[in-house]
Amino acid sequence: MNGFTPFLKKEVFELYRRGRLLLFGILFVFFAILSPATAKLMPQLLKMASLEEQGIIIGDVTVTASNSWEQFFGNLSTILIVFVIVFAGSVTKEFSGGTAIPLLTKGLSRPAFILSKLTAAVGVWSAGFWLCFGICYGYTGYYWDNSAVNDLFASTALWWLFSVMVICVMYLFSSFARTTTQVLLGTGASVLIPYLISMAKPAKKFLPTSLASGISFCSGEVSISECAPAIAVTAAIAVASVVLSAVLIKKRKI
Amino acid sequence: MAVLEVKDLHKSFGSKTVLDGLSFTVDEGSVFGFIGRNGAGKTTTMKIILGLLKADSGEVSVCGEKVTYGGSAANRFIGYLPDVPEYYGYMTAKEYLKLCGEITGMKQSEIKSRSAELLELVGLADEKHRIKGYSRGMRQRLGIAQALINKPRLLICDEPTSALDPVGRKEILDIIHSAKGETSVIFSTHILSDVEKICDDMAILEKGSIALSGTVSELKAKRSGSDLVIVFADTESAAKYAGVLGGEHQGCLAVVKGASQEKMFGILGIISEKKIPVIKIEHQEPDLEQLFMEVIGK
């Protein structure tokens, strides 16, 4: 793993200098504030949207912390999609553009190359993710009672595990795909296909997508303990993706 | 001692054979010109030496260490300048050299002093801008600096002057020439005047193997003889006497190929004897271009 630390430093520096850290900083904070804000404004919004003349009457709406977290989990998918789109080209562009070549010939090992990129991505994602959670927690707690929401921390942690797996899978595709589009298609397919399979109830408890149930865990609609197999499968996919990407990148033609 | 040894290298892409039993060595301290047409396999050879490409068969060793594909340990002896070097445009030259130094495992103090020394050598010491605004020549000069950062024993330059204007070319050749003291250089090109300027040894790659190799002066001397160009007073005389003098008629010229000194005296005799109206007789210096054309059969 020659060159892991210097290349990781370069990755973080690149994210900073190209404005990626700022972009995701703003995005995470924005969505963290947006979730409770939307929940708080929901009664007014619904009132404005109610069209009494057309016979649609919306009565008094009671908003709780649960509404805020529902928004939060919904927004996470949006940020994850933006994150994948922005990071999908991180490996392929280094090869197609030729920037990786001088460093690889200087002794940077190929596994170190891809693993430092993965580490930087997972690090930035996780920091932003939990910052987003923290802000949302504080803001929601200011208006309502967070303790009324069951298994909030566990539900969020499971969502985080799912998102980390998606990022690992993205780097697995990056290790051999020639273009950014291939990476995006591969990553997209590996989330979409299990999602479609999960429509069949018996398969659901094994599939990583069920970890992103978010508010359904909190409401008790889906039981966390039933998802134990999915947790194991997700962790296994993440670990296997990391190992495989380090193996496959060695075989990549330059 | 040989810094680089290439033995019986074979490489095909699909049905196209690029390297077909290529063998050569580069001696310590020499500047080696690796010449070939576009597409002759120069870049392929260099990529194999760097472990970036897998050879079908054959062996390459750098400083006695065998090159392996996919992460060659022999790379620690090598500095590489790609034909079109690409960098992280958001960095400055200094930041880039720091990254390169750290990857090769140099100490911070060493990186600092070596970077300053190299940026001075390549004329980028006062450059504070980010690399994305650099011209081609500046990128190439930075390429040499990054290649030399860890004092490699072999500097591999892949067509370093091909895309440059005459000023840029001269600068790069001067820098490579000045690096000669501390490293051996293998320098691929199809610009023969560059080879004549800075190389000690050279080899011509043709049809996947070395068609000719040796020291530059040796090879220039080896040519069967240089051409004699005779300029006649008019086209008719040229047409009439070119054959008599053993040359080929071209407009008001006759070119006698491979004319030795002896042959030239003979020709001068015929001219004076037959009173042939001649304006100029020139014995052309043998140059590499002619040699190259002969070797590739054009």
Image (cartoon, coloured by chain):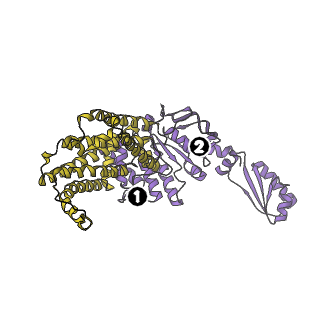
Q: Which chain is purple?
A: B
Chain under callout 1: B
Q: Residue furthest front?
A: A55
Hue of chain A? yellow
Q: Residue B41, which numbered label?
A: 2
Q: Position of residue B249 (x, y in %)?
A: 80, 58
Q: Position of residue B102 (x, y in %)?
A: 34, 43
User: Residue shown at 51%/41% (left/top)?
Assistant: B47
**What residue type is disc 1 on?**
Lys
Q: Quadrant of the N terminus of chain A?
A: top left
Quadrant in which residue B277 is drawn: bottom right
Could you tell me how far apart the alpha carbons at marks 1 and 2 are, in whole angstroms?
Answer: 30 Å
User: Residue shown at 14%/48% (left/top)?
Assistant: A146
Q: Are marks 1 and 2 in contact (CB under 8 Å)?
A: no
Q: Look at mark 1 in the image and give the residue it sits on.
A: B132
Residue B270 position (above or below residue B184)? below
Asked whether B203 or A22 is in front, the reply is A22
Tell me how many marks there are. Answer: 2
Residue A149 position (above or below residue B9)? below
Q: Position of residue B163 (x, y in %)?
A: 53, 56
Asked whether B217 or A126 is in front, the reply is A126
Q: Are marks 1 and 2 on the same chain?
A: yes
User: Residue shown at 44%/55% (left/top)?
Assistant: B139
